Image: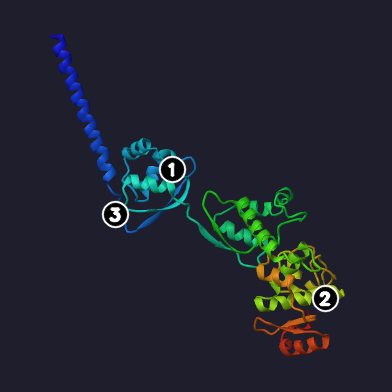
Amino acid sequence: MRIQFSRRAAGKAALLFFILVVAVSGWLFTYVQTKGPVVSSKSVIVMIPHGSSAAHIGHILAAAGLVHYDVRFLILAKLTGFSKKFQAGEFRLTTGKRPLDLMRDLSKAQPVQHPVTIPEGLRVDEIADIFSKGGWCVRNEFLHLVNDPDFISSLGLGNVPNLEGYLFPDTYYLTRLSSDAQSIIKTMVHRFQMVWKVLSKNGTGTLNERQAVILASIVEKETADPAERPMIAAVFLNRLRLGMRLQSDPTVIYGIKNFSGNLTKDDLEKYTPYNTYMTQALPPGPICNPGKESLMAVLHPDKEPYLYFVSKNDGTHKFSKTLSEHNRAVWKYQKNRNNSRRTK
């Protein structure tokens, strides 16, 4: 009797276990086949923080309208091994997918790339503003690094006091959680080094790299017309060769702390290392971060013996070879302006 009872009990247990397995399988299968919620967007962007558990990720996906969350998400992630393949970062995922398809997408997804454009001619503090306002870094940390001797030394630029002039203006594609001040600066300096290597392969003329970057930064600030840059470069190179003062307003402005926006006669007569109305050489450092065209203009300047230029009030300049010719141009283009006394 006992043997018969034991067999019956075992049979019932096996039956119950089978029923349980079938029920659980059906429970899981139903979830596996259920597509994500119906939403208006074909895709959504989610942010997965570092160290997120599979359960936390499931809640993030559910909040974004990608899955119906319950404990089955966690069970499936564990059973399939996807829980160990989920990535941290910002990802764009397609809506309306089944849970396993969504897990597979997340495990292979590439982070969303955000384009950030740095225009030519900005100072390091202006570049720091762009990245900090975009949430990519802390402004003070960025400014600390561009002046940190140890960090600068690690970049292979030689003995430069700061990174003004070496943050190459371009469009950069940044990803959340993997971009910070240090990585951004390294990328910008590396871009400069690559561009410089190509541009200077045939030599740098009479200038070394540092001098070329300084002069290119002045050329960058003096004109917005790419066609004029080789001529602007020629003026300054000719002046340096003859021992003349560069007399560049942008260099004076760079040397003024908290510049008001109005360059005065007193400003021009006040000595700073950057006041090229008072010194007969290049300023001690770049005054902005020049782009490729300005660097190229310095390496390949116009061959004309220009020594002067004056604004024509239309975004371009009149170039002259002699002072008398220049004075006539000043009278023609600047006679009604207060700054007609300035010569370049």
Give the residue at mark 1: 86
Marker disc for residue 239 = 2
Residue 60 horizontal/vertical position (percent): 40, 46
Residue 140 horizontal/vertical position (percent): 64, 53
Colouring scheme, one of rainbow, by chain, secondary structure, one colour: rainbow
Marks 3/1: CA–CA distance: 24 Å
Please, what is the three-letter code of the amino acid marked with disc 2?
Arg
Residue 40 drawn above or below residue 318: above
Task: Tell me the residue at 73%/73% (across/down).
Answer: 300
Farthest-out residue, top: 1
Depth order, front residue of 177/306:
306
Marker disc for residue 230 = none
Please, what is the three-letter code of the amino acid marked with disc 1?
Phe
Marks 2/3: CA–CA distance: 70 Å
Q: Are marks 2 and 3 in contact (CB under 8 Å)?
A: no
Give the residue at mark 3: 38
Depth order, front residue of 161/7:
7
Which of marks 3 and 2 precedes in the sequence? 3
Element carrying mark 3: loop
Say few, some or many: other residues with alpha carbon within 10 Å of mark 3 (under 14 / 14 to 19 / 20 or more): few
Q: Are marks 2 and 1 in contact (CB under 8 Å)?
A: no
Marks 2/1: CA–CA distance: 61 Å
